[in-house]
Image: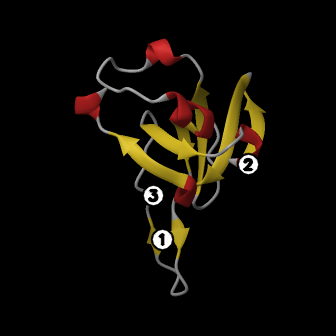
Amino acid sequence: MWTPMYDRVAVELIDDPSTLPKRLVLPDTASRTSHLARVVAVGQGVVTKKGVVVPLEVAPGDVVFLRAPEVRSLGTEVVVHGKKLVLLRESQILGVIEEETR
């Protein structure tokens, strides 16, 4: 396995809307400008000016909501162990879909 550096998060985009929970409905306009993704790996956290590491809020397995007109603007596309992933900063994640709503 590998670990992203610092505040980086590796996600796998969820392309198939049928994998979404039945209670979660995205309007057509949202599906064109936003993406759902599953977190695959996270860095150890942000290092402050005082050298303190602040851990990230997301964890592997979380389903997150991203906003971007196209995938390339989300972050860096990479292939790791045969999986297409997007590497981005945690601050680019708009929210985490909680377990109760999945």
Residue 3 against residue 11 in the figure, above or below: below
- Image point (60%, 30%), residue name: 13
Residue 72 position, x and y percent, is 77, 43
What secondary structure is found at the residue carrying circle 3? loop
Residue 67 against residue 37 in the figure, above or below: below
Image quarter (top left, top right, bottom left or bottom right) of the C terminus: top left
The kind of residue on which mark 3 rests is Leu
Asked which quadrant contains residue 33, the reply is: top right
Whether residue 92 is visible to the viewer of this picture, yes or no, is yes
Q: Which disc is residue 71 wearing?
A: none
Residue 98 position, x and y percent, is 30, 38
- Image point (47%, 51%), residue name: 94
Left or right: where does residue 70 sit relative to residue 26?
right
Whether residue 37 is visible to the viewer of this picture, yes or no, is no
The kind of residue on which mark 1 rests is Val
How much space separates mark 3 and mark 2, taking CA atoms? Answer: 21 Å
Q: Which disc is residue 56 wearing?
A: 3
Q: Are marks 3 and 2 in contact (CB under 8 Å)?
A: no
Dot 1 corresponds to which residue? 53
Left or right: where does residue 20 sit relative to residue 8?
left
